[in-house]
Image (cartoon, rainbow, N blue to C red):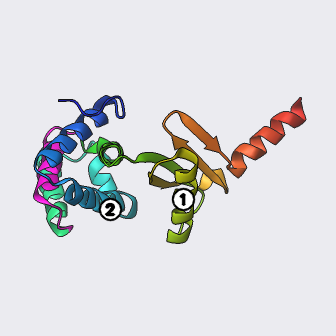
Amino acid sequence: MDISGGIVTGLAGRYATALFELARDQKQIDSVSQSLGKLRAALSDSGDFATLTTSPLVGREAALRATLAAADAMKLDPLTRNFLGVLAKARRLSVLGAIIRDFNKLAAHARGETTAEVTSAHPLDDTQVDALKAKLKTSLGRDVNVDLRVDPAILGGLVVRVGSRMVDSSIKTKLDNLALAMKG
């Protein structure tokens, strides 16, 4: 049974849906979510791990050994560890970040939450995230799970995307609009 319902699409969506269905059937959604959080942190914090997942120079067997060793070092749950092995064997580690994002969307949907993709110029602290969640909950009328990204190129402000709706209050966009208006 496909639970994605159009929430996720493409290659990453298919892998995320498969992982989510396995986690749901084994009642492991929370432990898989925690493991995927560790993987997301490793992708952003460890250049070596990010290179391992994206480099075409790393062979299939070497990638498998390295990812399983990393999974053991991070103390990932067995389901996520095995899933990483499948990705390594299939040479699909390059879509790991997108799989994590799509899994989180599916998990949030299953909990009755909406996922908002939030991009900021600098990391948000817990107080800011809580305030943002509260504001979004008021606006949307339901609980909101936030998928945080940092992109210094936006200079300041936030870009918030919920489904097909987007609110872009970034300084970069405001400067671009001002430049366009001055040309006019």
Quadrant position of the C terminus in the picture: top right
Q: 7 above or below 67? A: above
Residue displayed at 78% across by 39% down: 177
157 or 64, nearer to the observer: 157
Which label lies toward us, 2 or 1?
A: 1
Identified by mark 2, the residue type is Ala
Residue displayed at 34% across by 57% down: 40
Label 2 neighbour load within 10 Å: few <14, some 14-19, many 20+: some
Residue displayed at 32% across by 49% down: 111
Q: 85 above or below 180? A: below
Q: Which residue is mark 1?
A: 134
Q: Which residue is mark 2?
A: 42
Identified by mark 1, the residue type is Ala
> Mark 1 falls on what kind of element?
helix
Q: 182 above or below 107? A: above
> Mark 2 falls on what kind of element?
helix
Q: Position of residue 138 (x, y in %)?
A: 56, 52
